[in-house]
Image: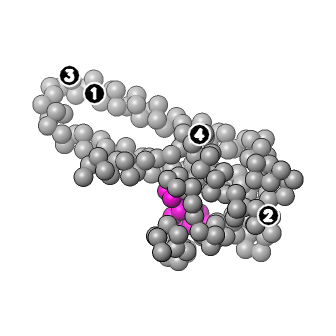
Amino acid sequence: VRPSCRPVVHLLVGMGASKGKLALKEVLPNIAKEGKVSKENLSIIFEGYAGKDATTMSERHLQNLFRDIVSIQKEVGQKIYEEGLKVFHASPGYKQMNFLQRGVVSASIATMKTTIFTAFSIAMSFYTNLDNMKVIHRRFSPDGVLTKEVFLKSAPGIIASELGKQNLIVATDIFQKLNQ
């Protein structure tokens, strides 16, 4: 069984995050990369956001889910940015720069970081708007009733689509390959 398809069994209860968010954090890279995730993991996510005994998910539950997606992706992006900065600062080219050149590069890097992380702020604003969430809710279920069964079928594709639409796909595997 591939790691991305195994059920989430090592959830850290009592660490401040719900089981749904922890499961989401575990499977999100695979959703972004392949658009696939096990039904058991999706079930944990559904129950974590809608409630253990819930049969449907409201726009508010979906809103919390997508806001967590943005925060998780932002956290991953921040780590990649920091690692990339460390690699750059350790490079021979950076070490050969004089003080003025380093200042210009640092200003450019700060501008780039602001530009990149603006996407996360825009996405968070988008998912905070309940009207936008109603549209996404309708994408899951045109009749307006988002059942667990519908969520299990539709979630990977819709979440992957939203990640792409909002420019939230964080390519950790590309960064890792470049730095081997």
Q: Amino acid at mark 2?
A: Thr
Q: How far apart are labels 4 and 1 at the CA level?
A: 28 Å
Q: Earlier in the sequence, mark 2 or mark 1?
A: 1
Q: How far apart are labels 3 and 1 at the CA level?
A: 9 Å
Mark 2: secondary structure = strand
**What percent of the width, then of the height, locates residue 117?**
48, 38
| Residue where numbered disc 1 is placed | 105
Instruction: Please give the name of the residue rendered at 74% of the width and 41% of the height, measured from the top-left corner.
Output: 132
The answer to which image quadrant residue 166 occupies is top right
* Mark 2 closeness class: few <14, some 14–19, many ≥20 residues within 10 Å: some
Residue 24, numbered circle: none
Mark 3: secondary structure = helix
Mark 4: secondary structure = loop
| Residue where numbered disc 2 is placed | 147
Residue 166, numbered circle: 4
* Mark 3 closeness class: few <14, some 14–19, many ≥20 residues within 10 Å: few
Mark 1: secondary structure = helix
Front in this rendered view, residue 10 or 34: 34
Do the residues under discs 3 and 1 have CB atoms within 8 angstroms? no
Q: Amino acid at mark 1?
A: Val
**What percent of the width, then of the height, locates residue 122?**
60, 36
